[in-house]
Amino acid sequence: MRILIIAFSPLDRDSRVYRQLLFFKSFSHSDITVAGYTDPRIDDVNFVRLDEGVPKSSVAKAFSGIKLKLGRFEQFYWEDEKVKSALGQLNGLCSDIIVANDIPNLPLSLNLARKNGAKVLIDCHEYTPREFDDQFKFSFFFKKYWDYICRKYLPKADIFTTVCCSLADEYQKNYGGDWKVITNAPFYADLNPKALDNSCIRLIHHGIITPSRHTEKMIELMNYLDERYLLDLMLINTNPSYFSKLKRLTTNNPKIKFRDPVAMTEIVDTINNYDIGLFLLPPFIFNYQMALPNKLFDFIQARLAIAIWPSPEMAKIVEQYECGVVSNDFSVASMAKALNALSSEDIMRYKMNSHKAAATLCAEKNHKLFAGLISSLLD
């Protein structure tokens, strides 16, 4: 079975694609190739380094904008430097199954599949038609474009997967298809909850930074928590100016520390030394409203209590497994009130409930579903 996985992302920190690769490695007699921006460094997986492209000049951006406003969507897509380069690099590969990670890879994947009769699995990490719907540029130039790409190309895929029920429902409602949910849960970690020191309750937040996520809200939160709480931020610096701003905001607060990020395969073991996983995600865009991210499942595998705002997909997990607190609203004050009310016994109970949930909320469960989907493609 010849597998080609395509992702316009740095594969050394794309945990969802990493899990796909390990899922496929479990199938016997598989020849696996992955194409992306960085090498995932997995034994027996062939890697094709894709060109990230260079920033467009002002003139090129203007012409691109004109194409989009005139509805020349096919021309815009196939003239994209990333797509053209990837098509040239992957054109000679023969595949039985192609996995397109996110909508921008779908037309490319279908083009390659048509040449050698391959089946296509589309895995959507986000809801692309509304990915940046809080930004004028996206709404003005790209909203109709991505809707067009979805309407034309999604029906041509063979299998449809995404990260949570809300995104599956939205894709199915607007574009059809029988969507399956494969969550962002990591593989099971054989860990135990660490004992709690009530005088020093350690909060951890990890992940990439982007201004739209308003990481500064978690920094602000520390001004309202009692003296028990400390916060470590383990951030991937994808935006140097914003990262510098966050550093400045913590200058006079000894309760907040930055620590260097670790490899994605080391995250769960590293954060097991903390007590509470913190993630305050503002619901400014649809994808944030319905987020069910890696880090929530990382917190559970690390046997942490969880503290989140009431994002519905995350709240559903936390409330079902009783493994943390969900604030009453999307405010810093509401979260501060919820955390300050916790006793040591509360936090340890949440950590123990994460421990119980870890065997269920793990990638091994998703692997069974994934294997069934792949088997159906080969029937």
Image (cartoon, rainbow, N blue to C red):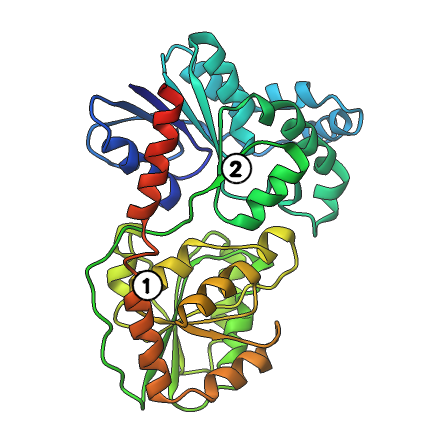
The quarter of the picture where residue 322 lies is bottom left
Query: Which kind of residue does numbered mark 1 sit on?
Result: Ala
Q: Quadrant of the N terminus?
A: top left
Report the number of discs: 2
In x, y percent, where is residue 298? 35, 59
In x, y percent, where is residue 40? 30, 37
Crowding at mark 2 (Cα within 10 Å: few <14, some 14-19, many 20+): many
Q: Is residue 182 left or right of residue 362?
A: right
Residue at x 55% of width, y 63% of height: 281
- Residue 168 visible here: yes
Query: Which kind of residue does numbered mark 2 sit on?
Result: Trp
Residue at x 51% of width, y 19% of height: 110
For the residues bearing labels 2 and 1, Cβ distance under 8 angstroms:
no
Residue at x 32% of width, y 53% of height: 362
Task: Tell me the tag on residue 197.
Answer: none
Sequence order check, earlier mark of 2 and 1: 2
In x, y percent, where is residue 378? 36, 19
Crowding at mark 1 (Cα within 10 Å: few <14, some 14-19, many 20+): many
Residue sitting nearer the eye, 92 or 344 = 344
Residue sitting nearer the eye, 156 or 60 = 156
The residue under label 1 is: 357
Q: Is residue 350 above or below residue 189?
A: below
How many angstroms separate mark 2 from mark 1 (CA)? 25 Å
Residue with the most extreme right position = 70
Q: Quadrant of the C terminus?
A: top left
The residue under label 2 is: 179
In x, y percent, where is residue 220? 54, 77
**Which element is circle 2 on?**
strand
Residue sitting nearer the eye, 291 or 91 = 291
Q: Is residue 27 above or below residue 281?
A: above
